[in-house]
Image (cartoon, helix red, strand yellow):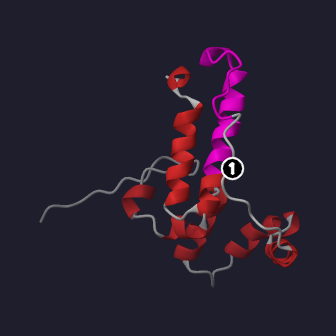
Amino acid sequence: MLKAITADDIANVRSSIYNRGKRPQSNHVLRVLKAFFRWATNEPSSRLKKSNPARDVKFLYKQKSDPERVKRLKGRTPTIDDLSRLPFLLANERVFPQVRTATRLAEYSAQRRLTVLSAEQEDVRQLSFGRAPHRVSRRVA
């Protein structure tokens, strides 16, 4: 139940991530929790009644501003034009089918590259991509 979650619970989650050495991740998790509880307080069915337990929990990690890093990231972030050309690039017969599938899965799911590439066949088998799910029939010899 959402009402049972306290600011101390959220601070403990944040601190445990921070103490494991995952400092930027502790900020990310806290940011997501703050956004979730901000949304939930506006949902009548959540019964939070404007009490956001994450609101006053402070970030532990102060990320330094690095203008060079920002410039590098902006330089490699694809533009809308780049993304609109992606289906045409993937249609090229020289693109390996595995690369085509992994790229489309990353595009459709908004997952990180390694998350998609490390997925097992069983993880992907249930996906339909607008078609009926793929069925694998096994013959017993």
- Across and down, in percent, residue 56 comes to 70, 35
Q: Looking at the picture, which amino acid does disc 1 mark?
A: Phe
Residue that numbered label 1 is attached to: 59
Is residue 2 in view? Answer: yes
Q: Residue furthest left?
A: 141
Picture residue at 87% right of the left edge, 67% below the top? 81
Q: Is residue 49 above or below residue 87?
A: above
Q: Main secondary structure of the magenta part?
A: helix
- Across and down, in percent, residue 82 comes to 83, 70
The residue lying toward the viewer, choosing from 116 and 3, is 3
Q: How many marks?
A: 1
Answer with the quarter of the image where residue 86 lies.
bottom right
Is residue 111 in view? Answer: no
Q: From the viewer's perspective, tell me whether residue 49 is left or right of residue 22.
A: right
- Across and down, in percent, residue 74 comes to 85, 71
Asked if the stretch drawn in magenta spans residue 45, the answer is yes
Picture residue at 74% right of the left edge, 64% below the top? 63
> What segment carries the magenta color?
28-54
Element type at marker 1?
loop
The residue lying toward the viewer, choosing from 111 and 7, is 7
Asked if the stretch drawn in magenta spans residue 9, the answer is no
Q: Is residue 97 above or below residue 37?
A: below
Q: From the viewer's perspective, tell me whether residue 138 is left or right of residue 110.
A: left
Q: Residue furthest bottom?
A: 94
Answer with the quarter of the image where residue 121 lies.
bottom left
Picture residue at 51% right of the left edge, 70% below the top? 117
Q: Is residue 47 above or below residue 13?
A: above
Picture residue at 51% right of the left edge, 58% below the top? 19
The residue lying toward the viewer, choosing from 44 and 23, is 23
Label 1: how many Cα within 10 Å (few below 14, some 14–19, many 20+): some
Q: In which quadrant is the C terminus drawn?
A: bottom left
